[in-house]
Image (cartoon, grey):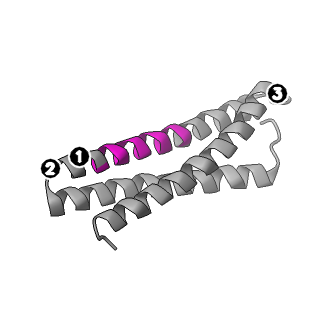
Amino acid sequence: MALIPEDIITTVLELQRRLLAIIHQATATGFTIFQNYGETETTLIALEDFDNIREKAYTYYSRFNTLLGRIAESQPIADRAILELLNRSIAEAQAIIDAAEASIREEKRNFNLP
């Protein structure tokens, strides 16, 4: 495997953990809203927002799996382009996670959920 600094691997794995949590929170919150309020114009908008959140989170989760796998197969060193994509994906995922967490908190407030 091409060598990746341990702190980058740790960062990616932590981001994946947080992305999984986002997928879970978006799914659970959407389910609770649907169960409590049914299908209304307002809930449909919220549920669509949760679908978008889940899709983005899953996209980055999968991207990290692919990138780490490709880097692991690289010998003797990883291609510069894939390392740049990994660094860009880390920054983008951090921003997406922050935005997703804020959106979930806002929807919970909108529907008076804990």
Q: Earlier in the sequence, mark 2 or mark 1?
A: 2
Circle 2 residues within 10 Å: few <14, some 14–19, many ≥20: few
Can you give x and y, in whole percent of width and height, for residue 96 in the image?
56, 47
Look at 48% across and 53% down and name the residue there.
100
48 in magenta: yes
Q: Is residue 87 left or right of residue 40?
A: right
Classify 83 as above or below 36. above
* Circle 2/circle 1 CB separation < 8 Å: yes
Q: Range of the magenta residues? A: 46-60
Which of the two residues, 88 or 37, is positioned nearer the viewer here?
37
Disc 2: which residue: 39
Q: Amino acid at mark 1?
A: Leu
Disc 3: which residue: 80
Look at 28% across and 65% down and name the residue there.
111
Label 3 secondary element: helix
Label 2 secondary element: loop
Spatial CA span between label 3 and label 2: 48 Å
Look at 50% across and 37% down and name the residue there.
59
Circle 3 residues within 10 Å: few <14, some 14–19, many ≥20: few
Disc 1: which residue: 44
* Circle 1/circle 3 CB separation < 8 Å: no
Q: Earlier in the sequence, mark 1 or mark 3?
A: 1
